[in-house]
Image (tube, rainbow, N blue to C red):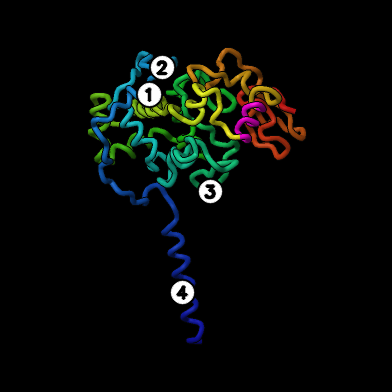
Amino acid sequence: MRIYILPILIGLGLILSFNFCKKEESNIALKSTTPILDPSYNYVHTSRFQGQVNPNEPLDNVLTNAKIALGRVLFYDPRLSKTSTVSCASCHKQNFGFADNLPKSIGFNGQLTKRNSMPIINERFNFSFFWDARTRKLEEQVLMPVADHIEMGMEDLNKLEAKLEAVNFYKPLFYDAFGYSKPTLDHIAKALAQFIRAIPSENSKFDQAIGLGFSNFNAQEVFGMTLFREKANCNSCHTIIHSLVTFNKTTLLPTNFLVNGAMTGSGYVSSTTFRRCKYRLGQSLI
């Protein structure tokens, strides 16, 4: 009989350990070290093209360095997710152009998102957001992934205010940005929106190519540019403005279409095409 006691005890221990170590938002321990921010960095200067006010910058959320700095901290903070395991930067990866290198992104509980995480560079020029253009304001867009039941899982956004209020280093950041130390959803959204507006594409290989007549492009890049301009007709929506590629906001078409008899909505990943629609528009590429 004694032979079986040790395996039974080990099994019980593993069961108890599993139950107590499940990822719940209440027992995730994160470092509360104050982020190191360079106070001399001029975010506003780098986020405005040639000093101009951004086209989608609202009057009640004018860019300031303090607000952009707060938005930057929020963007990289996994506390914005239910389990404190996923941040905005988990899917919008800086080393991949603030996009995801996966066909579908991985949410807070390991589930896959319905769509690929789109790049967020030069969003200062846009007036529609998400693949299906479901919102026209960046301040509205930024909290939707946070509340999404697959992406970040913070479906009760009121809990987010209390969660961030418990983090000491946020108090001075919110106070510097808004003159009010307590986090609010309005201020969280405005700060995130400001940081995203401060992610420009400047001096990239493409930007350099504008002045060089694209002579710096290799054969594969020239082929891609030709496809972009001609057969794929991408430039009917993504036009060159101020040497930047941005989205033409003038027309929004119905975005739903059928794939194997199921209504999917634009931007869903299909195995037969790379998107099965022109991004944000419901037109077929095939």
Q: Is residue 83 left or right of residue 66?
A: right
Sequence-wise, the earlier of marks 1 and 3 is 1
Magenta stretch: helix, strand or loop mostly: helix
Viewer-nearest of discs 1 and 3: 1
What's drawn in magenta, residue-wise?
A: 219-227
Badge 1 amino acid: Ser
Label 4 environment density (alpha carbons within 10 Å; few <14, some 14–19, many ≥20): few
Give the labeled residue for mark 3.
110
Q: Residue 151: image x %, image y %?
A: 51, 39
Viewer-nearest of discs 4 and 3: 3
Give the labeled residue for mark 2.
54
Give the labeled residue for mark 1.
47
Q: CA distance from mark 4 to mark 2?
A: 61 Å
Q: Residue 174: image x %, image y %?
A: 27, 30
Give the labeled residue for mark 4.
10
| Helix, strand or loop under label 2 | loop
Residue 223 is a magenta residue? yes
Q: Quadrant of residue 201?
A: top left
Residue 262 is a magenta residue? no
Sequence-wise, the earlier of marks 3 and 2 is 2
Label 1 environment density (alpha carbons within 10 Å; few <14, some 14–19, many ≥20): many
Label 2 environment density (alpha carbons within 10 Å; few <14, some 14–19, many ≥20): some
Q: CA distance from mark 2 to mark 1?
A: 8 Å
